[in-house]
Image (cartoon, helix red, strand yellow):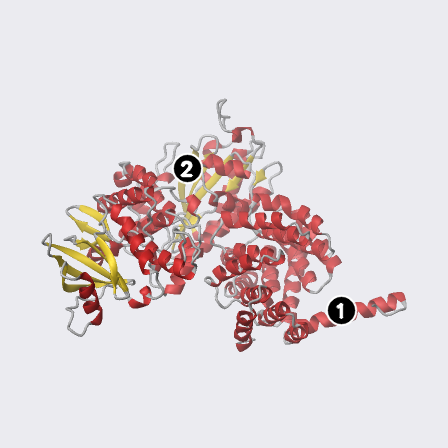
């Protein structure tokens, strides 16, 4: 928030220090306000008889800065002579407070405009974006980043937008970096400075490789705000906002402002990609898009559902404003293609044309006004994918693989080639009251054209029938020898309300957080209460109960008993449900019954070769057997399909167990390259670095993860261990003290034990583990195994 105007008094020491530093060249007239880094004064330059702005850093920001380095960095922006950039006239030091001088621009800030108008028209937004993009393109070409693009730093004057404070955040960071790290280079990043609402994920994470694309992310946030009337993660605290930049996808802009042209929506959302590689790569690319008339006056974002078969969809404004619901229209597309195989492309097409019949269902997008309906999109994606995977001879990419391929960016053909399929299915889901609406597009990967698109509407209670029909129509279109009257079973549910509960539970289970697992249990319990013959609901209820003890204070034995009952009930209803076999495998593993676990996992994979729980479980058993190479073989293919998934994470651990550290580190870094915002990927790399004995690098990764979850015992334990092994025992003991303050947290005792091990205190490590109820169960199992061995051999086990 901008400070109110302030007229300096004789006792204002900052003003006095600043005036003394400026001398007779400038006269300070009044304070204009300020922001997070500086106070801003209007002054008069006597020699040229003109008004200027003087900005002086707050004392807490200036503390620890290299004054000379700050001055040099700021003066670099003095060379930025461009109509859309406010240049720097002078810079200096006011008795310990760095300052810089700029021309005074008469007008208002974009922030002031947004305060009065909230959201801007599309033409005004595009005009401002063009000017800011021109400024960024000019500065970036000369190696200068802004690092604090926001409405407060964009001035509106004379019908143009002008960017102020170029290079200031970078100057502060570099000056502090040089002070703290005297051997750093002129481009050292040092710290994350900026405004939280506009910071790119890599800026939040203090990534030293951050480059100009962070400015493009901030430009995307500003564009989003001009169109939607708010930033993507508004109404949250600073910590929550920064975490959201790392892990959350913004609410679709098309939902907040349905009349926005599709080309503009696509540009803004591309700028907001978490991975810099998926954003426009430079400001010039953004300018090229903004110069397209479609950005201002093109079709709105729902125009993509228009039928290519001549049946027009209803106007987007009508069906979004009217609240009817968009689920993902696949069905009609297939009606147009029923009974024939799409014609192969002419020679010279991409290699996808030669692929065998196959399809990938890209993650459906929820465009419902109520964000709590997001479960519908994920549920439909998984249900249609699962139904299609049971069609003989049809290759179907898993959801996780489709997500990873889409996240890697590129054209439709690029995504399809990564997945090895010739067709992609994409769509949106919307719900309004008791109505659903499905909009879907079948895309031919060889040319990127829509084979078909349509919109159709049903009562919400017909969702099961809609999904079954969609899956059948897709199978018929992609593989012509499938019976045209075949209806693929999607879920096994009979009751629409039970199925809705199942989708809610499936969504919460897929989130896998401490908060979501109890919600998953409640939803699945409701589903089986409504439909006691719903086998898949019992199977996923079993998986939820099996995971619950690790995420809550739920009594372990009781949870595992409930998980066992649910899994057995699912198999009694339908022995072909792979998820139930996988759940039994997890339960057996938790009880150290490795043989039974392996059999259950193998049964699950025989029914569904894409089941990640079963595949990872088998790999863990192989590693416990000391056969890391076998574990690597189990995981390798799945890891190639999805480099950010659980299979890839465990593959890196298997490679590390074989002491193939460089390979393991490469696998872990590949996961981060595909998804730099996921804490799991960063924790994986830290773990592998730790095993390789590369403690300083492990510490750096773990410190970055603490920005996501500062109180995670797992992260704190690994960090304490690494600090201890790196010779920083006092810091390790400080972490240990913090863990000891609250031992009720899940994982606190193992984390304490890990720190003790790092410090070389093995006895204390064992004492720490004894505080964990699970340790008593381990001792009990070990004692039972020893007793069995004594009985079998006639002698005591060693």
Asked if one can make out residue 576 in the rendered structure from this viewpoint, the answer is: no
Q: Nearer the viewer, residue 589 or 779?
A: 779
Q: Is residue 22 above or below residue 485?
A: below
Which residue is at the far top? 347
Quarter in which the C terminus is drawn:
bottom right
Q: Residue placed farthest to the right in the image? A: 794
| Apparent side of residue 447 relative to residue 68 in the rendered image (left or right) | right
State the quadrant of the N terminus. bottom left
The crowd level at tag 1 (other Cα within 10 Å; few <14, some 14-19, many 20+) is few
Picture coordinates of residue 626, whole percent (x, y): 73, 55
Pointer 2 residue: 453
Relative side of 741 to 433, left or right: right
Q: Residue at the location (61% across, 48% down)?
A: 662
**Number of numbered discs:** 2
User: Which is nearer the eye, 170 or 524?
Assistant: 170
Query: What residue is rendered at 44% in x and 48% in y?
Result: 275
Residue that carries the numbered disc 1 in the rendered image = 782
Q: Is residue 730 visible?
A: yes
Identify the residue at image location x=36%, y=43%: 266
Q: Give the residue displayed 19% in from the left and 46% down from the top.
A: 160
In the image, taking residue 165 as reference, residue 461 lies left or right, namely right
Q: Considering the numbered disc 1 on the image, is that residue within a helix, a strand or a loop?
A: helix
Residue 110 location (% of width, % of height): 22, 54
Q: On screen, 443 above or below 277?
A: above
Q: CA distance from mark 2 to mark 1?
A: 60 Å
Q: Give the x, y percent position of residue 36.
A: 29, 63
Residue 541 shown left or right of residue 220 in the figure: right
Q: Position of residue 426 (x, y in %)?
A: 45, 42
């Amino acid at each position: 928030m901008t400070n109110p105007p302030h007229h300096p008094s004789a006792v204002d020491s900052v003003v006095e220090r600043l005036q003394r530093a400026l001398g007779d060249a400038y006269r300070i007239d009044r304070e204009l306000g300020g922001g997070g880094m500086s106070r801003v004064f209007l002054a008069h330059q006597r020699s040229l008889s003109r008004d200027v702005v003087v900005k002086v850093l707050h004392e807490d920001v200036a503390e620890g800065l290299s004054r000379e380095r700050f001055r040099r960095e700021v003066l670099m922006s003095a060379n930025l002579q461009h109509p859309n950039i406010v240049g720097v006239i002078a810079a200096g030091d006011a008795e310990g407070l760095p300052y810089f001088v700029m021309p005074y621009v008469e007008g208002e800030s974009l922030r002031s405009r947004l305060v009065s108008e909230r959201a801007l028209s599309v033409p005004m937004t595009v005009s401002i974006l063009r000017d800011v993009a021109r400024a960024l393109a000019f500065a970036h070409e000369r190696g200068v980043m802004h690092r604090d693009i926001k409405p407060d730093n964009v001035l509106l004057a004379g019908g143009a937008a002008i960017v102020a404070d170029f290079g200031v955040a970078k100057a502060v960071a570099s000056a502090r970096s040089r002070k703290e790290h005297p051997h750093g280079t002129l481009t050292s990043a040092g710290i994350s400075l900026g405004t939280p609402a506009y910071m790119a994920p890599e800026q939040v994470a203090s990534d030293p490789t951050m480059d100009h694309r962070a400015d493009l992310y901030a430009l995307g946030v500003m564009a989003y705000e001009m169109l939607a009337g708010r930033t993507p993660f508004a109404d949250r605290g600073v910590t929550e906002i920064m975490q959201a930049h790392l892990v959350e996808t913004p609410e679709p802009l098309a939902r907040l402002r349905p009349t926005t042209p599709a080309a503009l929506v696509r540009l803004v959302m591309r700028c907001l990609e978490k991975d810099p590689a998926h954003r426009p790569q430079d400001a010039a690319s953004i300018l090229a898009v903004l110069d397209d008339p479609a950005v201002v006056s093109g079709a709105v974002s729902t125009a993509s559902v228009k039928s290519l078969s001549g049946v027009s969809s209803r106007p987007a404004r009508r069906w979004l404003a009217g609240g009817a619901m968009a689920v993902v229209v696949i069905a009609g597309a297939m009606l147009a293609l029923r009974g024939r195989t799409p014609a192969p492309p002419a020679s010279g097409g991409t290699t996808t044309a030669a692929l065998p019949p196959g399809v990938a269902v890209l993650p459906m997008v929820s465009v419902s006004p109520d964000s709590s309906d997001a479960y519908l999109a994920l549920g439909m994606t998984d249900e249609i994918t699962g139904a299609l995977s049971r069609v003989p001879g049809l290759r179907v990419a898993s959801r996780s693989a489709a997500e990873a391929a889409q996240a890697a960016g590129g054209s439709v053909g690029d995504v399809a080639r990564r997945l090895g399929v010739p067709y992609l299915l994409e769509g949106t889901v919307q719900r309004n009251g008791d109505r659903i609406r499905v909009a879907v597009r079948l895309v031919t990967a060889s040319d990127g054209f829509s084979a078909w698109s349509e919109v159709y509407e049903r009562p919400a209670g017909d969702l099961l029938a809609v999904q079954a029909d969609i899956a059948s129509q897709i199978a018929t279109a992609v593989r012509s020898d499938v019976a045209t009257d075949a209806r693929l079973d999607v879920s096994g549910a009979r009751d629409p309300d039970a199925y809705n509960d199942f989708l809610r539970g499936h969504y919460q289970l897929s989130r896998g957080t401490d908060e979501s697992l109890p919600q998953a249990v409640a939803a699945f319990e409701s589903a089986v209460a409504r439909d006691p013959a719903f086998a898949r609901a019992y199977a996923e209820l079993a998986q939820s109960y099996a995971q619950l003890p690790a995420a809550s204070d739920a009594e372990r034995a009781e949870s595992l008993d409930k998980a066992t009952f649910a899994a057995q009930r699912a198999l009694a209803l339908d022995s072909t449900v792979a998820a139930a076999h996988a759940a039994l495998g997890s339960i057996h593993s938790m009880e150290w019954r490795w043989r039974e676990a392996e059999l259950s996992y193998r049964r699950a994979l025989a029914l569904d070769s894409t089941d990640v729980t079963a595949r990872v479980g088998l790999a863990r058993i192989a590693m416990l057997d000391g056969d890391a190479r076998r574990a690597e073989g189990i995981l390798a293919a799945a890891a190639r399909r999805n480099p950010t998934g659980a299979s890839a994470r465990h593959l890196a651990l298997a490679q590390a167990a074989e002491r193939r550290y460089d390979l393991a580190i490469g696998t872990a870094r590949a996961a981060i390259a595909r998804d730099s915002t996921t804490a799991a990927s960063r924790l994986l790399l830290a773990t592998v670095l730790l095993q390789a004995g590369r403690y300083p690098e492990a510490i750096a990764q773990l410190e970055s993860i603490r920005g996501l979850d500062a109180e995670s015992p797992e992260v704190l334990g690994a960090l304490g261990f690494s600090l201890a092994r790196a010779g920083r025992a006092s810091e390790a003991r400080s972490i240990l003290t913090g863990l000891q303050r609250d031992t009720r947290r899940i994982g606190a005792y193992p984390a304490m034990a890990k720190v003790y091990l790092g410090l070389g205190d093995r006895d204390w490590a064992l004492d720490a583990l004894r505080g964990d109820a699970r340790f008593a169960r381990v001792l009990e199992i070990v004692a039972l195994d020893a007793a069995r061995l004594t009985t079998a051999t006639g002698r005591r086990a060693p």
